[in-house]
Image: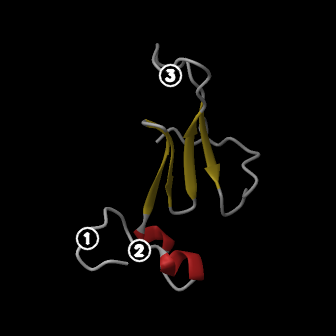
Amino acid sequence: MPKDRVIDGKDIRGILTGTGHREDHRFFFFRGEDLEAFRMENWKLKRSFKGEIYGEPGDHPVYLFDLENDIGEKTNLAEQNPE
């Protein structure tokens, strides 16, 4: 890696190798310029976009997964955890 450049991002080697703390990091997932999902600790918040992403609130379902207990993202916990 060249030393003369500023890299916009964080070193996540500790998370990938199991030597870091995942609670220290937050991840944002973009599709193009649109935020599709957010991950913090064991939680992943995801919005489902079909076609046009702008519209009335509630047009696009919100999904919340506890990845520690549901790595396959099968159980949506959004209604039980509105906060």
Q: Toward the viewer: 3 or 34?
A: 3
Residue bearing mark 1: 5
Q: Toward the viewer: 68 or 19?
A: 19
Q: Which of marks 1 and 3 is in front?
A: 1
For label 1, count other residues whose C-alpha is less than 10 Å away and answer few (under 14), some (14-19) or many (20+). Answer: few
Task: State the SS at label 3.
Answer: loop
What's the residue at 43%, 66% (across, down)?
Answer: 25
Give the Cα separation between the discs numbered 1 and 3: 35 Å
- What's the mark number on residue 19? none
For label 3, count other residues whose C-alpha is less than 10 Å away and answer few (under 14), some (14-19) or many (20+). Answer: few
What's the residue at 43%, 59% (across, down)?
Answer: 26
Q: Position of residue 66 (x, y in %)?
A: 64, 55
Task: State the SS at label 2.
Answer: loop
Residue bearing mark 2: 11
Comes first in the chain, label 2 or label 1 = 1
Which amino acid, mark 3?
A: Ile
Q: Toward the viewer: 8 or 39?
A: 8
Give the Cα separation between the discs numbered 2 and 1: 15 Å
Which amino acid, mark 2?
A: Asp
Q: Where 16 sits versus 61, above or below? A: below
Which amino acid, mark 1?
A: Arg
